[in-house]
Image (cartoon, helix red, strand yellow):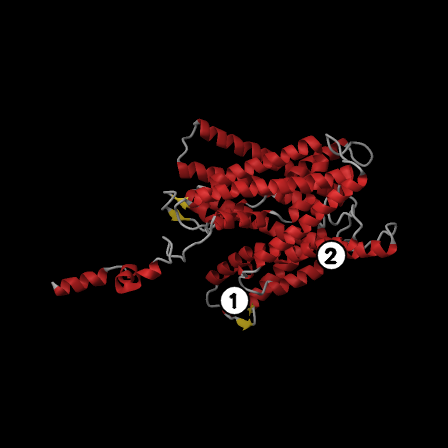
Amino acid sequence: MAASGQKTKQAVKPMEVSVEAGNAGEAAWLDDDGRPRRTGTFRTASAHIITAVIGSGVLSLAWAIAQLGWVAGPAVMLLFAFVIYYTSTLLAECYRTGDPATGKRNYTYMDAVRANLGGAKVTFCGVIQYANLVGVAIGYTIASSISMRAIRRADCFHHNGHADPCRSSSNPYMILFGAVQIVFSQIPDFDQIWWLSIVAAVMSFTYSGIGLSLGIAQTISNGGIQGSLTGISIGAGVSSTQKVWRSLQAFGDIAFAYSFSNILIEIQDTIKAPPPSEAKVMKSATRLSVATTTVFYMLCGCMGYAAFGDAAPDNLLTGFGFYEPFWLLDVANVAIVVHLVGAYQVFCQPIFAFVERWASRRWPDSAFIARELRVGPFALSLFRLTWRSAFVCLTTVFAMLLPFFGNVVGLLGAVSFWPLTVYFPVEMYIAQRGVTRGSARWISLKTLSACCLVVSIAAAAGSIADVIDALKVYRPFSG
């Protein structure tokens, strides 16, 4: 019996042995998946979402509303807010596979797609996600260079007067931004630096708040609200065809401002275990966050349009609707650059990690890939230095080829909106909840997805048409 008892004891799982040995206290600090206990709440999840949403996309909203007018502009923004909130609640249900309280956790958006859909849809999701990240890297390079150039121009206008054109190329600033990114890209897990999100939040609210304040001040200075019910007028400088294309591009700009669905699963993974369920907490956090963000977006977009009417620039802080106080514009644009330097790395880290994991599996014994030298915060290897530097150089060259902030933002918003914000959440929810094919709910969800696909295609067409129109007079690398 003693021998039998010893054999039984040896057959016990390691975790059970640990608990029997008196380490039950350690188990109390772990969640059901063996990871350290999560402590996130409704408040922290709401803060994470708001911080993630409010970014450089807010700067193009005044231009977007100018294309649509006082009636359609705010209405479209509210419609996007509702759709994104609704599909986010569907996505929240897909954090756990199976039982909503005890099912297997999905740690990333891709994990959720793999668990609920699988097959070719996982590949499709990966292609869309990584293509979107590359596009964001290009867009951030453009936006940061425009802000750096705007600092120089603001100072020039202040000293030489508004009649001086103060022309300068954005190419040197793109090269400078790229050089900084090559250095920062050698820091492993840059996106995990604890203070990065705090800096990003402070910078986002700084430049957004300055843009809103200047819009209010300009409206008061004008003595009234500018703009019209139908948006920019057809006439001098704007044909009926351009009006249509730009109105469609405005949809893409608004979609880009709300693009945060692909990080919601990661935010939900910080929420403490039930009760209440993570999905319930996440839905409440999303409701508050989308409402707060929409109010803020409405204020920024509408006050920008009220201040400038049809002349609203595609970037509120660099289009020089404002000239003074020049130092406040400088502060806002410095905040944009600081924010985008970090944001570029956060968005590129998944691409870096994906390629480096693939290379390690493909050539596991290669010293070129595996050999690493630690120098302070940097982890240097020949492969990492070569590959990451090449990626940064490539995105910089593309940015120099197409330095059109508004067009790129609209295209990114249009391309990512339907698949990442609508299609995958809808399909995962249908699979997760077993929604019967042909039922009223199934038809409603599929109709929503189809309508959003049409919107995405139309918005992408508008952005591409505007890029083609701009290329007719633009010389590559001319800045």
The tag on residue 110 is: none
Judge left or right: residue 242 versus residue 4. Answer: right
Residue, disc 1 = 369
Task: Decide: is 453 above or below 392.
Answer: above
Q: Closest to the observer: 475 or 302?
A: 302
Q: Dot 1: what SS?
A: helix
Judge left or right: residue 415 versus residue 439. Answer: right
Question: Where residue 248 sits in the image (x, y, percent)?
Answer: 67, 35
Task: Decide: is 131 above or below 430.
Answer: below
Q: Please name the residue shown 70% across and 37% down the image.
A: 65
Disc 2 vs disc 1: Cβ atoms closer than 8 Å? no
Residue 168: image quadrant is bottom right
Question: Where residue 84 sits in the image (x, y, percent)?
Answer: 55, 39
How crowded is the residue under tag 2: few (<14 C-alpha within 10 Å), some, or many (20+)? many
If you read the primary sequence from the N terminus, does the residue marked by circle 2 or circle 1 appear first? Answer: 2
Give amino acid for label 2: Met
Residue, disc 2 = 148
Quadrant occupied by the N terminus: bottom left
Q: Dot 2: what SS?
A: helix
Q: Closest to the observer: 449 or 119?
A: 449
Judge left or right: residue 2 versus residue 382. Answer: left
Give amino acid for label 1: Ile
Question: Where residue 17 sits in the image (x, y, percent)?
Answer: 26, 62
